[in-house]
Image: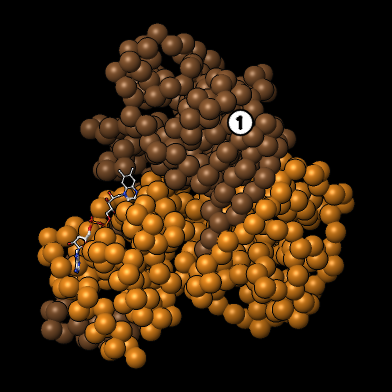
Amino acid sequence: MKILVCISNVPDTTAKISFSDGDTKFNKSGVQFICGPYDDYALSRAVELKEEHGGTVTVLNVGEADADPVIRKCLAIGADDAIRVDAEPSDSYFVAQQIAHIAQQEKYDLILMGRESLDFNSGVVHGLVGEMLGIPAVSPVMHLTIAGNTASLTREIEGGKQEIEATLPLVLGCQEPIAEWKIPSMRGIVSARTKPLKVVAPTGEALSTVEKYALPPAKGAVKMIPVEQVESLVDLLRNEAKVL
Amino acid sequence: MSVLVFAELENGQVKKSSIEAIYYGALVAKATQSTAKVLAIGASNSDTLSQLGNWGASEVLWLQETWDSAQIAAYAHALADAVAQEQSAFVIVAKSVLGDAVAASVAAKHKAALATNVVALPDHAAGVTVKRSIYTGKAFATVKLHTAVKVLSIKKNAVTPEANAGVAEVKHWQPSSNAANTGIKLVATHKASSTVALPEADLVVSAGRGLKGPENWGIVEDLAKALGAATACSKPVSDLNWRPHHEHVGQTGLKVAPNLYIACGISGAIQHLAGVNSSKVIVVINKDPEAPFFKAADYGIVGDVFEVLPRLTKALQ
Ligand SMILES: Cc1cc2nc3c(=O)[nH]c(=O)nc-3n(C[C@H](O)[C@H](O)[C@H](O)COP(=O)(O)OP(=O)(O)OC[C@H]3O[C@@H](n4cnc5c(N)ncnc54)[C@H](O)[C@@H]3O)c2cc1C
């Protein structure tokens, strides 16, 4: 089985978000970058499927050279090789186009990625890639097993879940608990250094551009209610906050 | 030219989130001197659909198919066809599992710029720009859309619908061709029987590890019931299987934007806050005065949930 795992290089979940250059650029200084947590689930499940069924796991990132440490970590976790499309991942359409372009040449059985990236939270790259390749895309997938050419999966919907059967090839957006996050072993880290990481040029253009970033207005001070007066909260919510 | 809104039906009724999308679409139509049309797919009735005129729709294209929500390709094929037939400049969907999937497919079919998590009406001053939420609610981006067709998925509360008496013309509609079979087979659907759906809820009562165990959720449910609220939980709570996964909010769970979010026995880790920071009013109940959640709260009570929740429930009844 040939699996492609698409990963994003994103600020750590605890990173302080700020902008520079007149609010036109994300301020990277002091920010630790990680493999998107949802992408991490996708990668972990891909490595498990490879162990179970044989085959290969290729990691794909659309990003600039500063993503290489995160890509190497994915190789250490168990991917066999990696491709980086050397470009800023400027919008979902652009990223999807790069993934579809590579998948057209290589014919993967499964294309896995996170349900959404942690930075832009668009949650549409899997859907775009599926449409571009003319194969189904399903998200957010919580369980995935493969038997022959058939995938059995569970995805989350509002207020519950759906069990779905589908035929490979497929594009899947993944989330917990599809697999446990894997921590690279010492041996993995050593072997990752020599695994192939191919850098390729991008194709096509983005359809949208970010003009400006902004932070939400600061939250006002919290009003503390003494525990003896718990009941007064009801009145405050009704008449002051007007939410009841 | 038109603005086309994809409306989701549930038990014959238009979902609340779709009403927001229709109202949003009507305002976009007004700003661009075009008309707002709605594509509704599923079982319903003409009366219900014509009432969408109250929210600004001038016409409803009604496709009476009862596809399950896993048939994304069929929905997307129909919507993309309607976009072509109606020469739509804007396609509006409400954020949902189906809405975002359909939006992605339609955008790819029409090579259209796509923005999700849109929080406000478009600005037409210089080209078309929209404001969207990014970094899980920790920031916003103003995005310029460069294509003739633009697809927008709007987040809850992007607009506050106000009804104006009107009647939409309801037309029975068919796509010009059928979608190819994608081989996606829905085997089973498991849905909680809870009365209030969390993603659309205006009031949410959420609880964390401070509740100590699943057997204690009665006091959370009682408060939710007294308020007519949906229940939610923190990640460890769903990891421990105290509550189902679809109730888990935060960075790796559902992002909610209710008018009121009451957090009970939740510490307020940054990853949890990421999923709830778009709430209008946040109440935090925690026995630790140093809990980080108080910094993100509008109202705080330092106290024991086992005492505070039943008293609140009683005060509401
Ligand atoms: C990559 C990543 C993603 C994550 N994503 C999410 C996410 O999406 N959602 C999420 O929630 N978390 C997420 N987390 C986990 C997050 O960091 C916290 O661990 C988690 O939110 C803590 O849950 P909690 O507040 O229920 O539990 P705790 O942190 O254990 O807090 C329990 C709180 O209850 C209070 N308490 C205890 N007893 C009582 C009582 N009797 N009365 C009143 N108060 C009481 C305590 O004072 C404490 O503040 C993520 C973490 C990582 C690393």
Instruction: Name the quadrant of the C terminus of chain B.
Output: bottom left
Instruction: Name the quadrant of the N terminus of chain B.
Output: bottom right
Q: In this image, B75 relative to A147: left or right? A: right
Residue type at tag 1: Leu
Q: In this image, B149 relative to A224: left or right? A: right
Task: Tell me the colour scheme of the image.
Answer: by chain
Which of A166 and B23 lies nearest the eye of the viewer?
A: A166
Image vertical order of residue A76 relative to residue B99, above or below:
above
> Which residue sits at x=42%, y=34%?
A40
For label 1, the SS is: strand
Rendering quadrant holding ligand 1: bottom left
Report x, y in % for residue B52: 68, 75
Image vertical order of residue B193 relative to residue A38, above or below:
below
Question: Which residue matches tag 1?
Answer: A110
Residue A195, picture quadrant: top left
Query: Which chain is brown in the picture?
Result: A
Query: Which chain is orange in the picture?
Result: B
**Is any atom of residue B10 visible in this view?**
yes
Report x, y in % for residue A115: 50, 43
Report x, y in % for residue B74: 75, 51
> Which residue sits at x=33%, y=15%?
A187
> Which residue sits at x=33%, y=58%?
B237
Q: Residues within 10 Å of mark 1 (few under 14, many from 20)?
A: many
